[in-house]
Image (cartoon, rainbow, N blue to C red):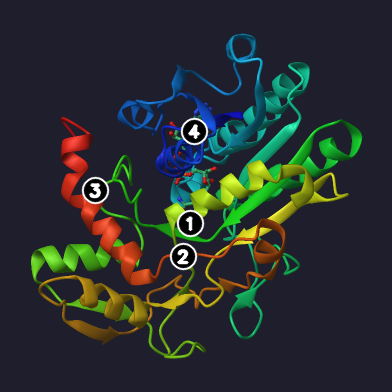
């Protein structure tokens, strides 16, 4: 089996490519390197270019007529940038996705696994969500994902295109074999703050301890990026059974329990040599309690559940951070 991975030189796409390779699926990568890294696309066939470039897509499908599915990870993903430049984000994430779909259909490729997000849900009172929860995007970035899903559902209803949208929660960790990981030195979320605190010797502040969660701190659904990647392998190998009679379907990928900030800090301190001091602090403006997903659909349709604990995911983030500069030579 051969698959095209757009954005396959990025954090998640490169991990999906490695999981495919390990599972005997041949990945072909298309990436403009706008945020991706050439070093992450060493093993598979690699095309540098834009998903909206029809001539390039014709060349990819012409040279690999046996591509049976596309995993579409390519996107711009920085929420504050999407607020500053909504036109650029709609063009990059929606318009170019539409062009990619057109080029796929023209080339007779009708299976799409779409990288979507779990960040657009409105959580219930217990903080949990599932695929039926209300979708209330709070940023242009999140809305581009919701718009894409709607667009893909409409196209699937009227064409041979078939779509499995995987809605990721909060990926952390790295390829356990350290072939790739996060390009940035520090994650932008709480784990990045913990790593910074560990390096500087400063305390880590839990900002907000009066949320309606099990310990009062905010909750997120951190999931090991390798677990996300293996979910793609399941979606690809079982594509037609996974979606059943539906032309398009969405599946949440998270842990089922979530991790509070306090639990994240405790897990971090389990895996580091020198524990970080943890202090309570008031909420910051704009902070939210957060959410986590129920995983029944992923278990049922993909026969998937996360294999890694939060502590293991943190350990892999740290192992990656230690080799990152060497893998990304000169950066
Ligand atoms: N990282 C997260 O927390 C997260 C959470 C939920 C969903 N997602 C989704 O997962 C996907 C991958 O995210 P990531 O974290 O790996 O980000 P990333 O920035 O590491 O990867 C995106 C990749 O797409 C490439 N790309 C962007 N626009 C392109 C274009 N027009 N043509 C060709 N290549 C292009 C970039 O160069 C990069 O390699 C995105 O669709 C994102 O929305 C990410």
Q: CA distance from mark 1 to mark 2?
A: 7 Å
Looking at the picture, does residue 203 appear above or below residue 301? below
Decide: marks 3, 1 in contact (CB < 8 A)? no
Determine which residue is flagged by label 3: 185
Looking at the picture, does residue 173 appear above or below residue 267? above
SS class of the residue under badge 1? Answer: helix
Determine which residue is flagged by label 1: 227
SS class of the residue under badge 2? Answer: loop
Q: CB of residue at label 4: within 8 Å of ligand 1?
A: yes
Could you say which is closer to the camera, residue 331 or residue 6?
A: 6
Q: CB of residue at label 1: within 8 Å of ligand 1?
A: no
Determine which residue is flagged by label 2: 307
**115 relative to 214 in the view: left or right:** right
Dot 1 or dot 2, earlier in sequence: 1
Decide: marks 1, 2 in contact (CB < 8 A)? yes
For discs 1 and 4, the disc positioned in front in the rendered view: 1
Label placed on residue 7: 4
SS class of the residue under badge 3? Answer: loop
Q: CA distance from mark 3 to mark 1?
A: 22 Å
Q: Position of residue 142 (x, y in %)?
A: 59, 52
Q: Residues within 10 Å of mark 4 (few under 14, many from 20)?
A: many
Q: CA distance from mark 3 to mark 2?
A: 25 Å
In which quadrant of the rendered image does the C terminus lie? top left
Q: Residues within 10 Å of mark 3 (few under 14, many from 20)?
A: some
Looking at the picture, does residue 179 appear above or below residue 322? above
Dot 3 or dot 4, earlier in sequence: 4
Residue visible at 69% across and 36% down in the picture: 112
Where residue 111 sits, quadrant-wise, is top right
Q: CB of residue at label 3: within 8 Å of ligand 1?
A: no
Q: CA distance from mark 3 to mark 4?
A: 19 Å
């Amino acid at each position: 089996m051969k698959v095209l991975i757009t954005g396959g030189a990025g954090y998640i796409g490169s991990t999906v490519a490695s999981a495919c390779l390990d599972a005997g699926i041949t990945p072909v990568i298309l990436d403009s390197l706008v945020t991706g890294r050439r070093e992450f696309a060493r093993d598979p066939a690699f095309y540098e270019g834009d998903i909206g470039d029809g001539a390039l897509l014709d060349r990819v499908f012409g040279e690999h007529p046996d591509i049976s599915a596309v995993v579409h990870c390519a996107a711009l993903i920085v929420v504050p940038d999407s607020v500053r430049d909504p036109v650029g984000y709609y063009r990059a994430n929606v318009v170019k996705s539409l062009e990619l779909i057109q080029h796929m259909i023209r080339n007779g490729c009708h299976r799409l696994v779409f990288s979507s997000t779990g960040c657009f849900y409105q959580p219930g009172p217990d903080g949990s969500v599932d695929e039926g929860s209300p979708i209330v995007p709070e940023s242009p970035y999140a809305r581009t994902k919701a718009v894409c899903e709607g667009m893909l559902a409409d196209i699937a209803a009227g064409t041979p295109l078939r779509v499995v949208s995987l809605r990721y929660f909060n990926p952390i960790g790295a390829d356990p074999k350290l072939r790739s990981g996060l390009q940035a030195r520090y994650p932008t979320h709480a784990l990045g703050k913990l790593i910074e605190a560990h390096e500087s010797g400063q305390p880590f502040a839990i900002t907000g301890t009066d949320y309606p969660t099990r310990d009062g701190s905010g909750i997120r659904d951190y999931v090991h990026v390798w677990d996300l990647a293996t979910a793609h392998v399941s979606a690809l190998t079982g594509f037609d059974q996974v979606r059943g009679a539906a032309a398009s379907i969405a599946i949440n990928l998270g842990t089922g329990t979530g991790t509070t900030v306090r639990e994240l800090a405790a897990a971090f301190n389990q895996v580091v040599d020198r524990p970080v001091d943890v202090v309570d602090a008031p909420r910051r403006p704009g902070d939210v309690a957060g959410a986590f997903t129920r995983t029944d659909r992923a278990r049922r349709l993909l026969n998937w559940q996360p294999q890694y604990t939060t502590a293991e995911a943190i350990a892999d983030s740290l192992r990656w951070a230690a080799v990152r500069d060497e893998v990304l030579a000169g950066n």
